[in-house]
Amino acid sequence: MVEPRSCKYYRTGYRPGAGNLLGVTMKKLVLIAALCAAAAQQPGWAAERAKTACYSPSAIEAEQAIRFLTDVMVISSTCQDTVYAEFRLRNRDPILAYQKAMIAHFHGAPAFDSWNTSLANQAASKRAGQPSILVCQQAADLLKQAGALDPPKFRAFAAAQAAAAGPQYPKCGK
């Protein structure tokens, strides 16, 4: 499976429950996310973005699946839970298929890796500054849902998310 390769949120040394280090670590996390977002705004990114300005139905579904997977990864890490690892093992085939679809959508693994890393940083920065206990309480339903999704249910979930989010995406073709 393809994991984010650069600007990884977990390279900040974040360890839930690390006491006073938590505030410093969260500030580093926000700074890294901001730097990654700024880098994404550079002209080279804009040219790449133009190539992916439209979405096929399969790309929309794949993006929704990867967004869910990323949220589960961040929450599972924050809460020191095994749900993400179990989810990845159980849903290996659909995850690989969704990653391949996004690699095709972004016209290569490097652009996908950049997007995937940015996505992970965004997911982590949404929760920056919140105590881990609160994050885990708020995300209990997400972790429970991830724990119940097998490959057919995960595909159905991603398809439903894509149908709901579809109008927000520019479509390819006509």
Image (tube, rainbow, N blue to C red):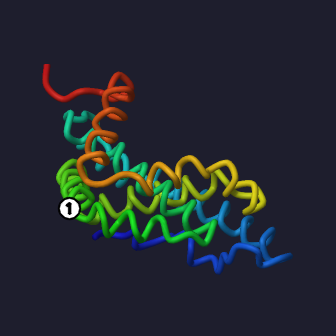
Q: Nearer the viewer, residue 80 or 59?
A: 80
Instruction: Tell me: 10 left or right of 162.
Output: right
Quarter assignment of residue 49 = top left
Callout 1: SS: helix
Q: What residue is rendered at 30% in x and 27% in y?
A: 170
Q: Which residue lies under the disc numbered 1?
A: 93
Instruction: Tell me: 68 left or right of 60.
Output: right
Q: Nearer the viewer, residue 153 or 75?
A: 153
Quarter assignment of residue 121 = bottom right
The image shows residue 72 at horizontal and vertical percentages of 49, 57
Q: Nearer the viewer, residue 78 or 105?
A: 78
The image shows residue 77 at horizontal and vertical percentages of 57, 69
Quarter assignment of residue 88 = bottom left
Quadrant of the rendering where the C terminus is positioned: top left
Specify few, some or many for label 1: CA neighbours under 10 Å numbering under 14, 14-19, or 20 or more: few
Instruction: Tell me: 125 left or right of 27.
Output: left
Farthest residue in the front direction?
Answer: 148
Query: Which amino acid type is marked by label 1?
Result: Asp
Image vertical order of residue 61 relative to residue 164, above or below = below
The image shows residue 154 at horizontal and vertical percentages of 31, 48
Image vertical order of residue 162 relative to residue 15, above or below = above
Q: What residue is rendered at 63% in x and 66% in y?
A: 79
Q: What residue is rendered at 67% in x and 54% in y?
A: 127
Quadrant of the rendering where the N terminus is positioned: bottom left
Q: What residue is rendered at 56% in x and 74% in y?
A: 10
